[in-house]
Amino acid sequence: MALDWMLDFPTKMIMGSVRYSAIVLATTKLIVLDTRDLSIRRVFSPSTGQEIPFTLGPEVGPCGQALEIQFGTLTEGQVVEFAVSYMTSPGSTALCWMTPEQTDNGTLPYLFSQCQAIHARSMLPCQDTPMVRCPYTAKVTHPSEFCVVMSALVKGQETVGDRVVTSYEQPKPIASYLIAIAAGDLVKVDISPRCAVYCDPTMRQSVTYEFADMEKYLTVAEDIAGPYEWGRYDVLVLPLSFPYGGMENPCMTFASPTIITGDRTMMDVIAHEISHSWTGNSVAPETWEDFWLNESFTVMLERKITSRIHGEKFFDMAAINGWQHLRDDVMRYGETHPYTALRPNLTGVDPDDSFSSVPYEKGFNLLCDIQRRVGVKPFETWLHKYIQDHKDRNVNTDLMVAHLQEHFANSPTVFDGIDWHLWFDCPGMPPVIPGFDVSMLDAVQATVARWAEVGYNTTEKARETSQWHHQQMVIMVQTLAESPIPLTASQLLRLDHDFNFTNGSNNADILLVWLSMCIKAKCTFHEGRLVNFLRIGRMKYARPLYRTLFSVAPDKAQKIFQQMRPKYHNIAQKMIAKDLGL
């Protein structure tokens, strides 16, 4: 695909065209593309300009409309070229247009895209499924004061009047959901020859410190998974409205500013997005029902990377934390809910509606069970081979299992105890309880138990936890939150005096649990920070916090949401509104 776009900030639209070069796999008279809320102007031959007839089908729920392009007979093996001229809608679910007031420094408007899972069709006509992949080029016309980035390599720039045309190329075949664009008042901060961070100018100093080890993470990932083949690994730090921790757009990870804590404790998010360069972007699932192949392998790589940097016990601590997130989501859905199956049936379902930690953590625990059976080194040898054998290819669950069994064919009984059907197709928690090293967890729980015995009145808390890893601090607040006897408002105030969580912590994982406790205890000292924290549109934090507030003070939850709603991304708006019964 060759994109030729103009960014129009006053109308909040992308205008332009896409030129397609396609190989015909079977004789047909139609080429069908996915669209949603697009205004199709014309379909034509790029070589002759001749019009090509087309029709738009009826609206089909979240899937939008089929753009049916009518040719004469196209024969197998034929290469066909055509182009579509169109413009997006201001309400495109893929595009978030922000006013200057919604940005950090208030100078320019801002645009960013988020196409996962099926939102690319509201940004361009495409075959919007993970199983269809192609390279793309782009020419983007934009005002000269804007910096524009894409999930591609910059190839050049030229000035045309008062505008700039920036050219990009993504030479590797990628799925439509990985096409990405952002534009705003951005500066580039170089980290290494192949790594840089783009951010608001006010964040230059903080990102220089926070991302200093990015090259190290990338090098460790290569040692596990093989050479990095995307040319550059850059990161864009987005405004607070970005709905995810990170999005693995090739060459240009989009990241939430919540990962900037001042102490590099949230860099596991970057380890995760780096890992997607191999698992997800290169080795990709065929459909969203196999999304677990995308995320669980990435979580495994992420935790192997961070444990090599922080120590082996970090792997187990992160895994325990992930197990708790998984348990919470399974309890929220219900243990028999079909979305808690690792391979859910998504027929007629918007994939966004099934999003949770299940594909991440349930799948990770399956991989851990496999690793336990075969051994760490043999598992890592297979993991490397699996990635290299399926590079730039699509896979499904059955293919993955077949590859695993073939690799360990000399040990035919090693997987006898695994009930694949139970893992993949049955809802609920994993059928195997993990055997992670709990020594760091035990240290946390023993310390918290001592505090509880004296009513949390000890003054040694900060000193006792001064050498803990941030994962232990997260577990600490979770342990406090799960106390059989809920903490009172006065006890929480005492803890806040000792740790200064409310106003002193920049770790959103800690603040999510802490503020939830304060809501349940009906405290008042946290309310200013609560409203400030809910400026964050990252759904990992916003959704559970709104749900907690809604359970205690529904009117208040809805009121705050209505105030914040315009600042959130479309996906977050939809999901939070559903959580709050709106």
Image: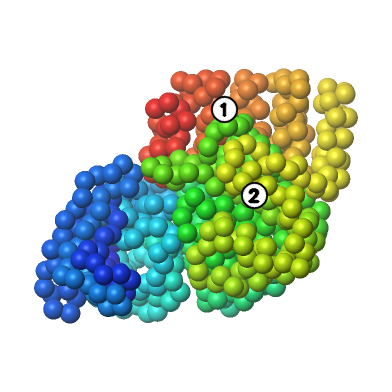
Q: Amino acid at mark 2?
A: Trp
Tell how many labels.
Answer: 2
| SS at circle 2 | helix
Q: Image quadrant of residue 189? A: bottom right
x, y percent for residue 122? 31, 53
Closest to the camera, between mark 1 and mark 2, is: 2
| SS at circle 1 | helix
x, y percent for residue 33? 28, 59
x 71%, y 50%: residue: 418
In front here: 348 or 489? 348
Q: Image quadrant of residue 348? A: top left
Res 107 seen here: no
Instruction: Give the residue pinned by disc 1.
Output: 548
217 left or right, relative to 537? right
Gap between marks 1 and 2 measured at Cα:
35 Å
In front here: 179 or 259? 179
Question: Which label's residue is closer to the chain start, 1 or 2?
Answer: 2
x, y percent for residue 381? 72, 70
Instruction: Give the residue pinned by disc 2.
Output: 420
In front here: 74 or 52? 74
In front here: 466 or 426? 426
Taking 57 as reference, is 513 above or below it? Answer: above
For the N terminus, which image quadrant? Answer: bottom left
